[in-house]
Amino acid sequence: MITPLTPMDWKRRAVKYYPHKVAVIDGEKAFTYMEFGQRIDRLSLALHASGIEKGDHIAVMLPNTHHMLECFYGICQLGAVMVPLNYRLSAEDLEYIIKHSDAKMLIIDAEYAAPIEPIVTNLSMETIIIVPMEGHETDLAGINYEDFIMHVNDRDRLPVADIDENQLMTINYTSGTTSKPKGVMLTHRGNYMNAANFIYHLTLKHDDVYLHTLPMFHANGWGGVWAITATGGTHVCLRKVDPPQILQLFSKHNITLLCGAPTVVNMLVNDPKAKQTEIKVRPRMATAGAPPSAALIHKAEEILGLNMIHVYGLTETSPFILYNEWKDDFEAKTADEQAMIKARQGIELVFNGETMVVNQAGVEVAWDGRELGEIITRGNVVMEGYYKDPEKTAEAIRDGWFYSGDLAVTHPDGYIEIQDRAKDLIISGGENISSTEIEGILYKHPDVLEVAVIAVPHDKWGETPKAIIVLKDDAYVKESEIITFCRSRMAHFKAPTSVEFVEALPKTATGKLQKYRLRESHWKGSKKVN
């Protein structure tokens, strides 16, 4: 007998075996798995009663609340398709995504309704469901979420969807930094296999307490929205990334696991309360989204006692395809050496498929830690393609392999380490320079809070590195001091030739640096901008 692989089965299991255990904590609210399951089923019944059927698409624009968790299950167990929206996008991008995704319904938090208000008349939306938020009024006409799910007949039977594991489950749109956002089609099977990797490699157990610091809209919370339920763990919701609140929640709920981009890690370790926070358990923290520096990993472990786990992936791969497996013989190394190892992206996960680094001829690079190539992958977690975009799909998936656009080397032990995004690599006088290598050096400077390194035009060398730095409070450093600091720690040709100090760096909602925005003023009208 074969049953489809779908995360929906994990909700059934959690309700069966953990009915009275706290499933979700959201501020002052808490729901057991039985209550959580009932709310999910009510949402499904309400959606079905409003005409939503298997295969229909529903756009959802909510922060990390219990409502968002309910949507992942309530929509998908009907066989409908969820389209999570990044609430920080412009009205123009949101209009494009909602139209392009063929969404029939929108579920939205009142706090994030402002960009939808001017475009709502352009949307052929059948229904809008609004989650009210105190202090945030909206002019959108819609149905209150609680009224929507509570006005169903408890005696109605939940419609049973005949789910095929290869059918579409979510459409997750990329940020669209260089073109219109692309809709990544992820299936029930792909989401299931990615969450299985999450469970296995992040060592989830039934008594884990998971803090949702990572936006759930981003690649379905990296799979955390499914994995925590699968093991009967507790979801702790976090509406906004707020370092003091996160540190408080560490102690209040004994958080054991969280995920976030390196920028979130940086915010935590540099918060004034970090050193005073009493943490009874040592939380595991998975980080990805940009290559974390060894210096940052060292700070996170030293200051907060976090057990850092480096993972790697893309929205197109559900997202995990590599993780940094920690070996016993690493324990004998110094703290600095351990941090350098943890900065590598690592090896294939158990359930995702095959990943390797290849040169321009498509041949795997030597395992020498030097030969540069592109990360490619194939297997269980790769997307079905870009929604309604066969041309972009054909560009990304070639000969059965997904091409990531990330440049990396493979070390003698098989561990892959990213050197740069292809578009971020700096080629100066014919020499390849990794922007992430320079950033890793600069994060060791005691006065540097955040840094981004980009290529800028140069009359002699074509282009050279420029460091754009956010300093810590009350710090003062000269450009020449930064350049000297780098030149004393790396080959001189790799060091920045210029430095700019800024108040903040542009980032996406998930904390990724938007280097293209930094390049714009230097490469106006040039392809290098993207």
Image (cartoon, grey):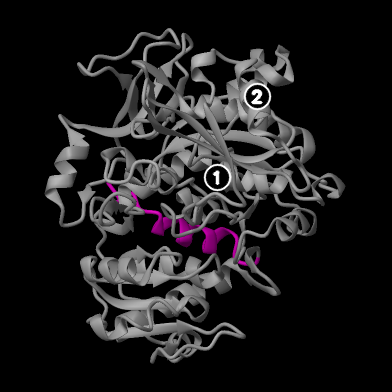
Q: Which residues are magenta?
A: 1-20
Q: Is residue 286 left or right of residue 524?
A: right
Q: Residue at x 64, y 32 (%)?
A: 443
Judging depth in this view, the residue of 135 and 231 nearest the camera is 135
Q: Quadrant of residue 526?
A: top left
271 w.r.t. 285: above or below: below
Q: Is residue 433 left or right of residue 286?
A: left
Q: Residue at x 31, y 69 (%)?
A: 92
State the image coordinates of residue 62 (x, y, percent, origin top left): 47, 70
Q: Residue at x 45, y 83 (%)?
A: 130
The reply to whether the magenta stretch includes residue 310 is no
Q: Secondary structure at mark 1?
A: loop
The reply to whether the magenta stretch includes residue 15 is yes
Q: Residues within 10 Å of mark 1 (few under 14, many from 20)?
A: many
How many badges with numbers are in the image? 2
Q: Amino acid at mark 2?
A: Ala
State the image coordinates of residue 26 (x, y, percent, origin top left): 64, 69
Q: Residue at x 35, y 77 (%)?
A: 106
Tag 2 residue: 339
Q: Mark 2 and 1 residues: CB-CB less than 8 Å, in contact?
A: no
State the image coordinates of residue 373 (x, y, percent, origin top left): 33, 20
Tag 1 residue: 261
472 w.r.t. 329: above or below: below
Q: Secondary structure at mark 2?
A: helix
Q: Quadrant of the C terminus?
A: top left
Q: Residues within 10 Å of mark 2 (few under 14, many from 20)?
A: many
Judging depth in this view, the residue of 435 and 347 nearest the camera is 435
